[in-house]
Image: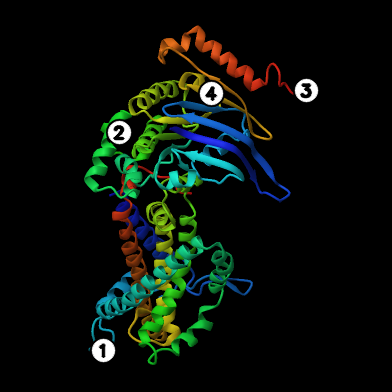
Amino acid sequence: MTAVVVEHVTKVFNKGRPDEVTALSDVELTVGDGEFVSLIGPSGCGKSTLLRLVADLIEPTTGAITVAGKTAGKARRDQDYGIAFQQAGLFEWRTVLRNVELPLELRGLGRAERRARAEEMLALVGLADFAGHYPAQLSGGMQQRVAIARALAVQPPLLLMDEPFGALDEMTRERLQGELLGICAKTGTSTVFVTHSISEAVFLSTKVVVMSARPGRITAAIDIDLPARDEAARQSERYFEHVTAVRQALRGVPAESAP
Amino acid sequence: MRRTFFVLLGVVIFAALWEGYKLVGSPDGTVVFGVRVLPRADDLSMPHLWTVFERLGKPELTGGRPVWIVILHACVFTFGITAAGFVAGALIGLLLAVLMQRFQLVERGFLPYVILSQTVPLVALAPLVAGWGGTIMPAWATVAVIASYLSFFPVAVGMLRGLQSPSASGVELMRSYAAGWWRTLVKLRFPAALPYLFPALRLAGAAAVVGAVVGEISTGTRGGIGRLVIEYSREATSDPAKVYTAMLGAALLGLFVAGVVSLLEVPLMRHRRHVEVVTL
């Protein structure tokens, strides 16, 4: 079974009004089970819109989206995905542990089970010692890790991430990338990851989907095969080849270059 | 510790200003071009602070109870009215805020009237409300109605702002959890609104005291501190310290209400004790 299927999806904002914007035009995307797919492109290319469509936070104008074999709306109601945004968006009045418990609470899990699961998730992101802290007491990187733990708490088959490391410094970002890969490998989660960093996309993904703006559409899908995803991989020849390929696709080189 | 010090310092500065002005100010006040810019400093207009405190210990009328007991009783009476008006006003304000958040139509249609309600002069409203006393409600309740009329406003406006304060990503997160309006309200909007609610409640507390005092005067309700201020001010020429004792009581009542209201937030704002959170 495939994690996500997007078929002929078009999204038009403010349809029929003077400020009508075609955010996405006839987009096709398939994310296989266990795949890590990055969406990359200039701002305004609709990559976040595409992620929100998959999450059923907004509805497509035309086309169909299937998540885990169900409609996107059904998948959302069944909490079949976890989501993390650029801003960690933790609830400041809840402790770290209670933040991670939130999706479990809304699912109606019992107190003890909730607590056990949340503690397990915090251990996974390396924050077991900070369960009783409040978000404002943590650094940006730690907050983002809590957000990831929260997204993983319901153990969803699909993880949706909208530039989760965008607001972090380079060192924290690279460390979290490594941790995220480890977590995805351990849990077998499929991931859709929105980013505007080429190196991040190549390092994390099994497939990089390149998008272009006005109207937003997919211009290339590049399969990434790195033998390993570690510090050495960041220096490898093949890594740089992929980076170059993605960069060229982003620039529209060679065939589709606009005048 | 520091706070207590600054509170005491404030009292000392006030006392020094009062007595200092009495010392240097002209007993007839300072008049510039026919306008009195500084008040009279004579004992009739500004009694010595110790005279006021002495007056507290003396009987209200010859052979009667001491003034401080009378004032204490009046304050307790007015506090009861204030509390009733405050609770009713706060509940109405909360309900309005939730309705306005839920239905944009209600916000657009109702918010102008909420603001308009506060521009109606209280003295125009009081006789109408006073007419309800003794028929559909006891006389004291009419005063509580006036207090609630003043106190619902800051709660409605502050709470509406608080309920609308969560970021779009927070709301989307709740949507991604398939949480409906009610659970989003309980888990996200309400806790997020608390930092807005408490300042609004403090304003509402002060407004409720003003409403109760003014309400007592304009509805002619007996037994409260507002009534006492009016009664004692009639004796101001013969017993100037007496009216100041009543005013002191009213001021302390206001402080007491403010203190009680700020106690409400202690259990609900636990995370604030760990970290300073920016709200505005």
The residue sitting at 31% across, 60% down in the picture is B264
Q: Position of residue A215 (x, y in %)?
A: 68, 35
Give residue B243's mark.
none
Chain under callout 1 = B
The answer to whether residue B123 is left or right of residue A62 is left
Asked if the residue at tag 3 contacts the one at tag 2, i.e. Cβ–Cβ closer than 8 Å, the answer is: no
The residues tagged by marks 3 and 1 sit, at their Cα atoms, a distance apart of 102 Å
The residues tagged by marks 3 and 4 sit, at their Cα atoms, a distance apart of 25 Å
The answer to whether residue B166 is left or right of residue B85 is right
Q: Mark 2 points at which residue?
A: A122
Mark 1 is on which residue type? Thr
The residues tagged by marks 2 and 3 sit, at their Cα atoms, a distance apart of 51 Å
Viewer-closest of B241 and B167: B167
Looking at the rendered structure, the secondary structure element under dot 2 is helix
Query: Which label sits in the foreground, 2 or 3?
Result: 3
Give residue A259's mark.
3
Chain under callout 2 = A
Residue that protrudes farthest toward the front in the picture: A1
Mark 3 is on which residue type? Pro
Marks 3 and 1: same chain?
no
Chain under callout 3 = A
Q: Name the residue under label 1.
A: B62
Viewer-closest of A3 and B90: A3
